[in-house]
Amino acid sequence: MPKLAPSQPLIHDGCQINASDFGAYCEVGRGSRLVHSSFADYAYCDQYADIANTSVGKFANIAAMTRIGPTDHPMGNASLHHFLYRSSYYWDDIEDDADFFAARAARRTVLGPDCWIGHGAIIKPDVTLGAGAVIAAGAVVTKDVPPYMIVAGLPATPLRPRFGKGVADRLLALAWWDWSHAELRRALPDFRALPAEAFLEKYHG
């Protein structure tokens, strides 16, 4: 596999990317679709992820077949159908409903740094995931998830924190995801070898 690069994302075959941007060392898996979204440094998604109107944090880990920020249909109107807002598809004398699309795009989903979205999970619009949160495979997330919380189910509910509050707070204060590429490389042996508490003792005191 080609190495990831700081200058441009690695985008695999069959992707659809519209009005989206990328930081350094990003990757987009085969067949994925990104619309009006941003990937911060080191964020990636596996194959067939469908991501709309989402700010993806640094080091976010997004598994295959996920749906993030899925757009809604107009449930308060007489019809749910595309013809209400994609009207130009059906008639030559009418434009699409720009206000509807603007309202959709404004409903932002935010993924915090180093979160993990499991296979097939769905993250609804207007949801924020905290740093280090874990979303179990197949979960449907309809509410905000605190940092370092593990959630699962439909709708997703908290299972347990990844760490005790003291550890989570210290990781947030350390904010290693803002380190330079060189700093990350120097600390890589400790990222690999040390549990979170020991890592904090060495790098946060």
Image: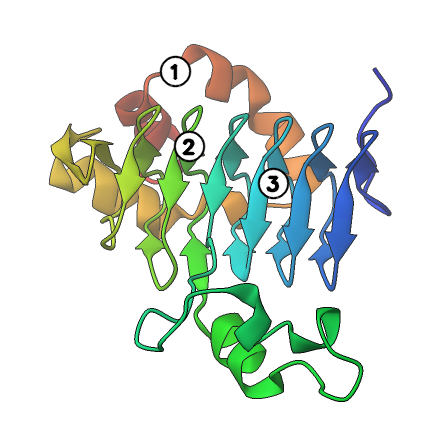
Residue sitting at x 56%, y 65%: 82
The disc at residue 15 is: none
The secondary element bearing badge 3 is classed as loop
Q: Nearer the viewer, residue 186 or 146?
A: 146
Q: Position of residue 160 (x, y in %)?
A: 12, 29
Residue sitting at x 35%, y 38%: 132
User: What is the CA distance from the residue labelled 1 to the residue labelled 2?
Assistant: 20 Å
Q: Residues within 10 Å of mark 3 (few under 14, many from 20)?
A: many
Q: Is residue 186 left or right of residue 191?
A: right
User: What is the CA distance from the residue labelled 1 to the residue labelled 3?
Assistant: 23 Å
Instruction: Name which residue type carries label 2.
Output: Trp
Q: Nearer the viewer, residue 111 or 35?
A: 35
Instruction: Name which residue type carries label 1.
Output: Leu
The secondary element bearing badge 1 is classed as loop
Q: Position of residue 193 (x, y in %)?
A: 44, 11
The disc at residue 194 is: 1
Q: Quadrant of residue 201?
A: top left
Q: Is residue 40 left or right of residue 76?
A: right
Q: Position of residue 7 (x, y in %)?
A: 86, 47
Residue named by callout 3: 43
Q: Position of residue 11 (x, y in %)?
A: 80, 36
- Quarter of the image with the N terminus is top right
Number of callouts in the render?
Answer: 3
- Quarter of the image with the C terminus is top left
Q: Is residue 14 left or right of residue 141?
A: right
